[in-house]
Amino acid sequence: MNARLVDLELQVRAMAPSRAAAAEQLAFLELGPDEIALLRQVHAPLQARQQAIVAAFYEHLQTVPTLRAMLADPQVYARLQCAQADYFRGLTAGDYGADYVLHRVRVGVVHQQIGLEPQWYIGAYRKYLSALAPLLQALLADRPELYLPTYDALLKVVCFDMSLALDTYMQSGRRELRDSEERFRAAFGQAAVGLAELSVEGRWLRANRKLQEIVGYSEAELQALNFRDITPDHEWRADEEAVARLVAGEMDHYSREKRYRRKDGHIVWVKVTVALMHAGTRDASVVAVVEDIARRKQYEEELRHLASHDPLTGLANRNLMLDRLSQAIAFAHRAGRHVAVMFIDLDRFKNINDSLGHDAGDQVIIEVGRRLARNIREGDTVARVGGDEFVVLLSDVARDDEVAALAAKMLAALSLPITVHGQELAPVGSIGISLYPRDGADSRDLLRNADAAMYRAKELGRGNFQFYAEEMNARTLDRLKLEGGLRRALQRDEFELYYQSQVELSSGRIVGMEALLRWNPPGGAVVLPGDFIPIAEETGLIVPIGEWVLRQACAQQVAWREAGLRDVRVAVNLSARQFKQTDLARLVAQVLAETGCRPESLELEITESVIMERPEQATAMLQTLSDMGVHLSIDDFGTGYSSLTYLKRFPIQTLKIDRSFVADLINDADDAAIVCAVIALAHTMGLSVIAEGVETEAQLDYLRAQHCDQLQGYYFSRPLPAAQVAALLALD
């Protein structure tokens, strides 16, 4: 061994801490047997991916000109990579004894001797930790609860290593490293946790990059604030009291979980560890270590969710339902409103379990829960309270008929077929309804009376709903009368189509007409679709009504063309039930042939939610219609949850932006952003866009600026009868 190496080894052993000091430091870092065991568990799989980590590590070093020059020699570069790989192997091996300490001190001495500045040393650690985080998360994907403890254990080892290496700098008399503001900022800024210095009054003095990421403020912005400014409500009082105890010498440090309000308004959970610091002649200040614990809080929230929700369906369980029911009753008492409780029991559910097995029964329960949840209002609750028993809580009810309509809607949704284990099942439910305050003053009475009403529904033949108060059942007669009139409306020729023009923005000309249904019952006012279409959907009457609309619209398009008017496309809305009909394509072909309407003159509009309910089947049906030459569009786009993967597979030509986004796009930045995004998405995919509900010139100008293709709304024309449309087309 030459003299240089001997000298190096003497320095290393002189600077190395004693066994007791090293053990004390590891204990202070809280690196114990449990953490070491966690690191050993991931040691082997990490080594298998070590080459990629080392490569990323050195690619990062190459981004710094100074380090790039140091690594220019290929042999040096190769030796360093080998040494680094050896370092990574030891980092998670779980042996942190005397040899490990000497090796780390040796690394620090060598780095100090070759002139490697601390900021690059710390930055390299930061890069390693950043590269390792997603890798650890992937390795522990099947045990996500181990990710944070394992990563925390790794941080403790890294902190130990950094302290050993950096201690060599201080022992070598390089005090300027500690006192240099520029170097301090570099080390401070590269930390993997948030670091900040504050005055004892709470004013931010400095904040590293990680803390700036956590709170969303730049360091300059923070320096103009007090910590109270980003702490919600009066949570800051606890911090003030703790800092006062620090200043008084009553404790060395304190830790607490708290919330910060980010610059964007969102709340983020953090763990803050604060200690008092005296720096030379400066006034005392406090140093805060801020950890983002949002992921841990998420796990805690998931545990709370499991405690209050049914594990099979994910719905509220009995405890959560009772809590919400109590709150709803308290609110209704103050506001003079009503609360409705629906007790739902599946009829003959035992037969499913007995014949197909409990797995099939579970699938039916899950699907029933989904259907109920899809048919409630925002703010209402669906709970599973027993094997095949559900409770629906309507927390704010103004009228009894609201409850009746919703109950009928739920029964219709439940009766749709479910295919389980190759068997088509049609669940039937019985619903009992009680209302606060008429049928009970507390949760117990309301549930008991709703249960009694449910049994009354079973006695009356199952598959129906009953109110606990008998006179309330009579109020559903109005809806039944509407349903009866609807059943006879087609026979009596009481329907009429109105048409609303669709205008091409570039030319200002009418290029299409959307067919809109109206009902003219004898001796009554015109009934708008919103009042009768839901009933038609529930009863299945929408299928023959939809066929009438399709045939009438196609015939009218031909009549306009044969009258010498400009050829425009006519758009027809397809309902959910129509689209699910297996013979839809055959019906469309038959209507086109019988009316003489050309396929390219017909546009079929299907709502986004209907398509996405069964995307695979929808793709096949849309392709069949497209192959016929029919123009296809997605209606009410943006209100559902389309997958772009499916969207690009659908053979559609047009996206229709729902009127709810257009109505307030001038004043609502979120609506404007959605409209812009839909237009950009459509054009990227080679689709045209039509915006519905355009009523003002300001909306028109905005949509023109965004290069929307077509517009529709009262700004151009209200829906008109066919005769008036002919006059409009003659002028266009």
Image (cartoon, rainbow, N blue to C red):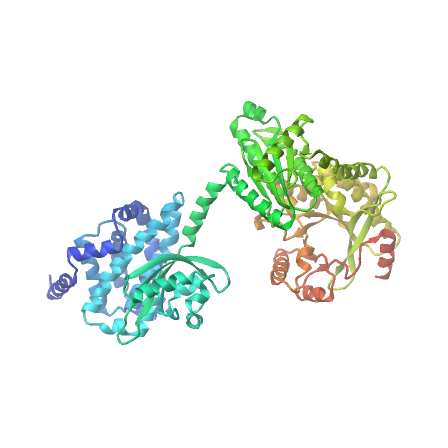
Viewer-proximal residue, 330 or 393? 330
Picture quarter with the N terminus: bottom left
Left or right of 120 on screen, residue 416: right
Task: Locate residue 224: give its quadrant.
Answer: bottom left
Picture quarter with the C terminus: bottom right
Left or right of 223 on screen, residue 351: right
Task: Locate residue 461: give its quadrant.
Answer: top right
Q: Is residue 638 visible?
A: yes
Left or right of 79 on screen, residue 211: right
Rendering coords of residue 26 (x, y %): 23, 54
Which residue corresponds to the image point at 45% horizontal and 67% vertical from the top-left?
229
Residue farthest to the bottom, as pictured:
281
Rendering coords of residue 168 (x, y %): 20, 65
Q: Is residue 579 visible?
A: no
Which residue corresponds to the image point at 20% horizontal and 65% vertical from the top-left?
109
Rendering coords of residue 140 (x, y %): 37, 46
Task: Locate residue 683: give its quadrant.
Answer: bottom right
Viewer-proximal residue, 563 or 282? 282
Viewer-proximal residue, 69 or 435? 435
Rendering coords of residue 286 (x, y %): 33, 67
Left or right of 713 on screen, residue 269: left
Question: In the rendered view, would you say 585 is above or below 659?
Answer: above
